[in-house]
Image: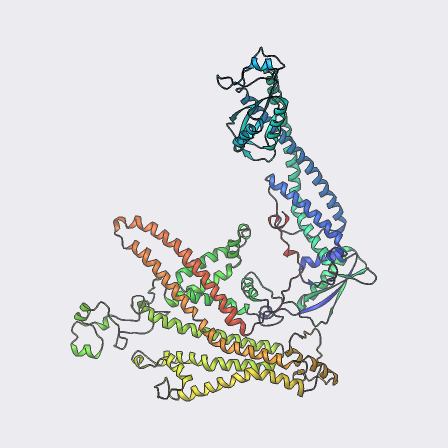
Amino acid sequence: MGSLFRSESMCLAQLFLQSGTAYECLSALGEKGLVQFRDLNQNISSFQRKFVGEVKRCEELERILAYLVQEINRADIPLPEGETSPPAPPLKQVLEMQEQLQKLEVELREVTKNKEKLRKNLLELIEYTHMLRVTKTFVRRNVEFEPTYEESPSLDSDSLLDYSYMQRLGAKLGFVSGLINQGKVEAFEKMLWRVCKGYTIVTYAELDEPLEDPETGEVIKWCVFLISFWGEQIGYKVKKICDCYHCHVYPYPNTTEERREIQEGLQTRIQDLYTVLHKTEDYLRQVLCKAAESVYTRAVQVKKMKAIYHMLNMCSFDVTNKCLIAEVWCPEADLPGLRRALEDGSRESGATIPSFMNTIPTKETPPTLFRTNKFTEGFQNIVDAYGVGSYREVNPALFTIITFPFLFAVMFGDCGHGFVMFLFALLLVLNENHPRLNQSQEIMRMFFNGRYILLLMGLFSVYTGLIYNDCFSKSINLFGSGWNVSAMYGPGHGPAELQGAALWNDSVVKHNRVLQLDPSVPGVFRGPYPLGIDPIWNLATNRLTFLNSFKMKMSVILGIIHMTFGVILGIFNHLHFRKKFNIYLVSIPELLFMLCMFGYLIFMIIYKWLVYSAETSRVAPSILIEFINMFLFPTSETSGLYTGQEHIQRLLLAITLLSVPVLFLGKPLFLLWLHKGRSCLGVSRSGYTLVRKDSEEEVSLLGSQDIEEGNSQMDDGCREVMSEEFNFGEILMTQVIHSIEYCLGCISNTASYLRLWALSLAHAQLSDVLWAMLMRMGLRVDTTYGVLLLCPVIALFTVLTIFILLIMEGLSAFLHAIRLHWVEFQNKFYVGAGTKFVPFSFRRLSQKFSDDVV
């Protein structure tokens, strides 16, 4: 509790690292994660630092490892991720590891390149085979045709050209054949017609099965084409058009014998390529499997090595360039561990002169460290989202563990919905070590990280649901109702008895649809329900009126208690930072202002609950009217809640009015008196001391320490320096703004807590509407079709309950609970202007290839 109530005590340490042992010492520090390094080379560019060459070498190794992981994933080889993190590699093994990785990369790239070339050749040969098979049906060969002339296509039985006529003209017939993407056929044909002016004959045929593109690897539909043309110029144009449309052009055989020889040669080459390609893939897979065994270890080692050199670049060298000097923030409790880490690093490197450290005083504000575990981490993240706590101030997360799920449950009060949420969170908690939950998608990971918050939210919702007596909008009669209906009914009641009390007889029951229970009648009200709201209120027509009154007063009470607790926590901050005058001039006036108005309102609510009974409830005064009359001073006398109420209210109002000028002027005038009327006294404390000089208040406090510590006086020159720095106007303006914000905030923040009542009402009404529209309709159907209809109704009711009432309403209540903590509670004492302690720890490095390596 000590470390969660306040941040850890920090100190600034200076590390003296020998050049030969610096790497090993930082490796030991990274494994333990004890210190946060300060950058001592802020004015030096990242490219001009000492170890920039080593960082570039690590980046080159990361590039090689990323390539290896990419190839391993492409080959569908599982990546073994070890549970333990390997240490950073020794300097002696770095060059050897770099040489091995570079050699492996060259070998893999060469084998992969050969494999891709073989695969491309194989696909081209397969395309050539399909082209020869399809174009065989395009042309009818004339055996007597002269070899100097090319074959011309015949379309069915009609010949477009007279071959003998073309032979007499001496025209040379040429062919271009190949494959084209099916989607480009129409545009390709139009382009040929326009460019070649009709001196070509184009024949198409679609392949039965899609083929893989040798260039891109995509599986697409192809069309085989055969273009017949006359003349070399036309042939040149045809080939250029084929190149523009990325056609795969293959040579066309002149004779049938040549076609047969080509097909036989293709079949032989394809079989040979299949054999070579399989052997290449087997060899490549063996190399990748061997690389996959060590790629995880090497990736983690390279990450750690790169992190070490980044930290070494933040160190500075002494004048001899033989020793590195580093400045680190370290928790005081971890100083022995820091010394042991330096000793271990020096021992591992075999250095004769060990590295050492010493603490140095500083006036800078240290970073903030709260030690959390898997239970408290989620609540600390809620507070840190508002702002990281200032150094050594009270941490709201300790109290948020209880107040946050409780305020959520007040707005989400339903024991049925809360139990479902509790079971879901309990399932996550019991399976928190499951690897799939840690590697799940973003939304599921968000639920998993907040599993303990959900667990408490569900548990508290079950409790508030029992208080409200709500379970899926229905009441539960566990102990029996405290109201007795039979005491109101008597068939023999006469008119005289009916006039004296609101009793029922046969005539009243027959002619009235709504009957009213009178608790003043003996035997009707037998006592309060043992736990929460009496279940009979679920049947009452004035149920909402009763519950609204109860929840509204409950919200006001909880809100005022919550805000008052925040002001009290501010007193602990003033005591810790030795600003006792803030207790008398700020905290106590704030408490008086809050309690004399709204604390008195709580008193009136509880007093009315305790004093007035069912018999006297009709003459009980209105709390709202009495509270308004406290400020208006009415001339007419009112009955009041108790004797002497008017005098007590005037006294409380006077105290409230007197606390306002104290809030506005007390602290500025006191600081001015300290500055001008007191001697300028110094402060000397043993050990590390935090001295803040970021406001005029701290400057004035330098002269007030004699009151609390009894230090001796300094020379008069100090007063002159402080006179130049002290600015009374700034202090006064700051305090006036703070006081106005607090006084108005007491009213607005109290009204803001009414959201507890509003969201509780909305959740109950939505649950009631969902029950009335689905479950009530399904349960009222007769037994013939009731079972068949009830199953889909229950399924729909479950789905809507989860998505509307659990997720949407739960998210709404969650956001409102966050707002109540950030705005209404934490602004009473929490500054949240600190910086988070970020230690140099290898545990912070990503260990997953999918997140960082690839």
Q: Is residue 110 left or right of residue 166?
A: right
Q: Height in image: 341 above or below 229?
A: below
Residue lying farthest to the right in this orientation: 320
Q: How far across and how far down the image is residue 397, in percent? A: 55, 67
Q: Height in image: 495 above or below 199?
A: below
Tell me the quadrant of the picture where the N terminus can be found.
bottom right
The foreground one among 840 and 178 is 178
Residue 577: quadrant of the picture: bottom right
Color scheme of the displayed model: rainbow
Q: How far across and how far down the image is residue 239, in percent? A: 62, 27
The foreground one among 266 and 155 is 155
Q: How far across and how far down the image is residue 247, in percent? A: 59, 30
Q: How far across and how far down the image is residue 387, in percent? A: 58, 67
Q: In this view, does 245 lie to the left or right of 594?
A: right
Tell me the residue at 63%/22% (across/down). 232
Q: Is residue 112 left or right of residue 784?
A: right
Tally of numbered discs: 0
Residue 177: quadrant of the picture: top right
Residue lying farthest to the top in this orientation: 144
Q: Height in image: 162 above or below 525?
A: above
Tell me the residue at 36%/70% (across/down). 548
| Residue 271 in view here | no
| Residue 741 in view here | yes
Tell me the residue at 74%/48% (across/down). 94
Q: Height in image: 317 above or below 529?
A: above
Tell me the residue at 37%/60% (across/down). 767
